[in-house]
Amino acid sequence: MKRIRLGVNIDHVATVRNARGESYPSPLRAAILAEKNGADSVTIHLREDRRHINELDLKKIIKKLKVPLNLEIAATKEMLKIASRSKPPFICIVPEKRKEITTEGGLNLKYNKNFLRILIKKLKKNKSRISLFIEPSIKDIKEAKKLDADCVEIHTGKLCNLINKKKVYKNEFKKIQKAVFEGNKLGLEVHAGHGLTFTSAKILTKIKGIQEFNIGHFLIGESIFEGLPLIIKKFKKILKS
Ligand code: PXP
């Protein structure tokens, strides 16, 4: 059986850091730790409003990371400039709305077509692997191929929500399955991401042909609970001495 690669999204380490305006927790330290523990790639989303990761994080991480850095960016001139300068090995183009809490849906490929085509062409000149974050739609898969993307990342948010709420998810699962099949058929690498937990990731592994999962919020959240016992013990030791 082919192993699915894991991309670890560390944006929310920066969210915690920024909540206090401190220098810790360090996204660079998280990136290196993810790499040491088997992450196949590390993802950061440089948002227009810099609400989590900033350009200094990008510079530091890209310099030190040995596994590929996957930079998520919106299709804007500013991001094109930054990505052209930093030349990350992987780039995922995502939609971005300033007021959203998280990436709410896939790209509107029809609306953005001309700029996306230019963006993809320019970024590919730096040998970056280009992925488009899309809804599980056959139309969008075909459009992504026409735009000359290397990969598509399928937005799994809807499926994950249904699973979390213990609702029937069969239709959404089938939609993703068909999209994956179509993507593979067209020679695209197919990834999945958004909202994934242990349960939804396990369910999605039943769809053959997904090469990479990108997971952030749940993974970082769960790490708190796994790490908390050790950190409390460390402080107890300090207070005893
Ligand atoms: N993939 C893409 C393209 C995303 O935009 C995000 C969220 O920023 C993720 C994966 C990770 O989603 P989550 O943080 O819910 O695991």
Image: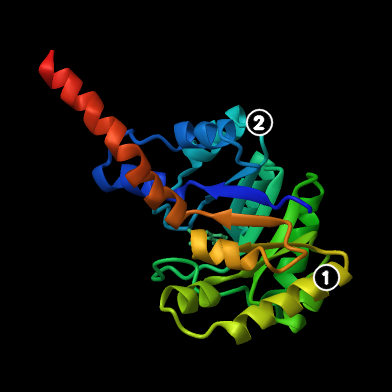
Other-residue count near label 1 (Cα within 10 Å), few / some / many at <14 / 14–19 / ≥20: some
Quarter of image, res 108: bottom right
Quadrant of the image containing the C terminus: top left
Along the viewing direction, whichever of 123 and 101 lies nearer the viewer: 101
Q: Position of residue 136 (x, y in %)?
A: 67, 77
Amino acid type indicated by mark 1: Lys
Q: Is residue 156 above or below residue 89?
A: below
Residue found at x 60% / y 74%: 106
Instruction: Please indicate, yes or no, whether residue 52 appears anywhere in the rendered image.
Output: no
Q: Position of residue 133 (x, y in %)?
A: 64, 67
Q: Which residue is mark 1?
A: 145
- The secondary element bearing badge 2 is classed as loop
Label 2–label 1 contact, CB within 8 A = no
Q: Which one is earlier in the sequence, the residue at label 2 or at label 1?
A: 2
Amino acid type indicated by mark 2: Lys
Quarter of image, res 181: bottom right
Q: Is residue 99 above or below residue 202?
A: below
Residue found at x 87% / y 65%: 187
Q: Which residue is mark 2?
A: 66
Residue found at x 33% / y 33%: 23
- The secondary element bearing badge 1 is classed as helix
